């Protein structure tokens, strides 16, 4: 392996880089360490393409292969038809190709990865795992994988479901072949360790240090904040609505993400009439914009469900965004969030149901000194400890140990 190859690292995701901040943070850290960074990704949501482009323009040293599948890109229409037909045919076969079922652009991404001749291939999202392992094997290189979720129970706990069985088969075949493995929470890491008897490094979903602390709120209505890629059902939003319906406290609830108008109307209908003026919807913004605006709120709500299992054991970037931007945290009682809040009990409070959440909102409304002290403590924690500047060192050490 020559010197140039030793310095090239290829990161792969089946989706947008702008919707995969862990990949972007890794790429940024690798470039700062002097590695040549190459990305392979697919674009399929029109509104996210501009955010992908912003990331690429901010990092001109990166090279990349991007497949644009958005409706505006007419050049991909024929490819979509071919890919769709291929999937239908494969699904009719007794031993259909699992790679295509999980990642319809498997062949395209693998072909691009093989040409890169990297020293290390890193997969993000399960659809990229086979590509990272197979490209590394073909090019006599190393492979790594980052599990942001416990994939086999990402959608369902039914072990007889096709989704569970597909993902378990992919994991069982490829994870033992990896040279390193990272996970986005201690509980996810522990589960993979127990399944495969391998070392799994937990790396938190933190971000680089935030320049400005959140605003101090002494008298204005409490501003609640919730965000995700999608504003949709089964994300705990209904519990938040029920909580604010039950109290008369002056407040605002801000929801940010991609939302369907029908679901937006459902939430409006769930909200009592006198509260609807307090409900605000915001469209998706870039990761950098999100970090800039989050500090204008008071309480960040981490409303994860306890099922399927993945939701119970994950620690999302939502939680760490709130803390780093200086918001008090109201976190649902999942196993992962309970463990986290036990270690950092000064960052906010745990709630079990809508009644608990309503009590937390009232508490911070009536105790502004405690609200602002909690916000300050969260921001300082993000500055001193829970930030990417610190967490990235775990990742960089792994890379150096893997490829020398």
Image: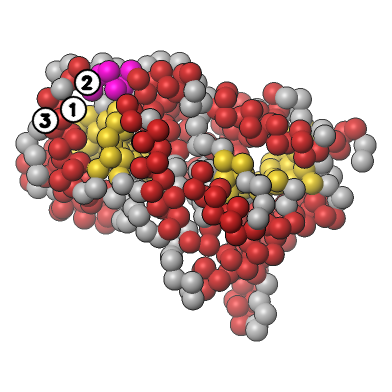
Q: Residue at x 61, y 29 (%)?
A: 392
91 lies above or below 1 = below
Mark 1–mark 2 Cα distance, whole angstroms, equals 7 Å
Closer to the observer: label 3 or label 2? 2
> Between 383 and 87, which is closer to the camera in this rendering?
383
Which residue lies under the disc numbered 2?
370
Chain-order first, disc 3 or disc 2: 3
In magenta, the rendered stretch is 371-376
Name the secondary structure under disc 3: loop
Mark 3–mark 2 Cα distance, whole angstroms, equals 17 Å
In the rendering, at what x and y percent does residue 322 appear? 37, 31
* Residue 284 appearing in the image: no
Q: Which residue is drawn at 22% across and 21% down?
A: 370
Confirm or deny contact between disc 1 and disc 2 (CB under 8 A). Answer: yes
Which residue lies under the disc numbered 3?
250
Q: Residue at x 73, y 36 (%)?
A: 399
Chain-order first, disc 1 or disc 2: 1
In the rendering, at what x and y percent does residue 325 appear? 39, 24
> Between 226 and 202, which is closer to the camera in this rendering?
202
Residue 401 placement, left or right of 2: left
Mark 1–mark 3 Cα distance, whole angstroms, equals 12 Å
> Between 222 and 254, which is closer to the camera in this rendering?
222
């Amino acid at each position: 392996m020559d010197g140039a190859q030793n310095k090239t690292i290829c990161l792969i995701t089946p989706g947008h880089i702008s919707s995969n901040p862990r990949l972007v943070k890794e790429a940024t850290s690798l470039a700062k360490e002097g590695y040549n960074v190459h990305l392979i990704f697919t674009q399929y949501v029109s509104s996210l393409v501009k955010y992908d482009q912003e990331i690429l323009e901010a990092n001109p040293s990166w090279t990349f292969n991007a497949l644009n599948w958005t409706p505006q890109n007419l050049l991909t229409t024929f490819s979509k038809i071919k890919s769709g037909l291929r999937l239908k045919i494969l699904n009719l076969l007794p031993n259909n190709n699992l790679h295509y079922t999980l990642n319809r652009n498997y062949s395209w991404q693998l072909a691009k990865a093989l040409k890169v001749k990297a020293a290390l291939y890193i997969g993000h999202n399960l659809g990229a795992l086979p590509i990272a392992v197979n490209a590394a094997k073909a090019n006599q290189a190393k492979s790594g994988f980052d599990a942001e979720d416990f994939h086999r129970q990402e959608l369902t706990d039914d072990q007889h479901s096709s989704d569970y069985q597909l993902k378990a088969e992919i994991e069982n075949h490829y994870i033992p072949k990896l040279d390193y493995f990272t996970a986005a929470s201690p509980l996810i890491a522990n589960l993979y360790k127990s399944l495969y008897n391998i070392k799994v490094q937990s790396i938190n979903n933190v971000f680089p240090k935030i320049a400005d602390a959140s605003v101090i709120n002494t008298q204005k209505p409490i501003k609640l904040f919730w965000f995700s890629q999608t504003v949709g059902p089964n994300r705990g939003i209904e519990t938040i609505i029920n909580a604010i319906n039950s109290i008369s406290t002056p407040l605002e609830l801000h929801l940010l993400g991609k939302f369907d108008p029908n679901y937006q109307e459902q939430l409006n209908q769930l909200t009592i009439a006198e509260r609807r003026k307090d409900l605000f919807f915001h469209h998706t913004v870039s990761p950098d914009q999100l970090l800039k605006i989050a500090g204008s709120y008071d309480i960040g709500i981490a409303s994860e469900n306890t099922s399927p299992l993945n939701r119970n054991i994950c620690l999302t970037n939502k939680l760490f965004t709130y803390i780093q931007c200086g918001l008090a945290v109201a976190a649902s009682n999942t196993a992962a969030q309970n463990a986290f809040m036990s270690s950092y009990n000064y960052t906010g409070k745990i709630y079990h149901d809508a009644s608990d959440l309503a009590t937390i909102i009232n508490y911070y409304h009536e105790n502004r000194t405690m609200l602002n002290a909690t916000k300050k403590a969260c921001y300082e924690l993000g500055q001193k400890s829970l930030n990417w500047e610190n967490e990235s060192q775990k990742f960089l050490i792994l890379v150096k140990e893997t490829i020398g």
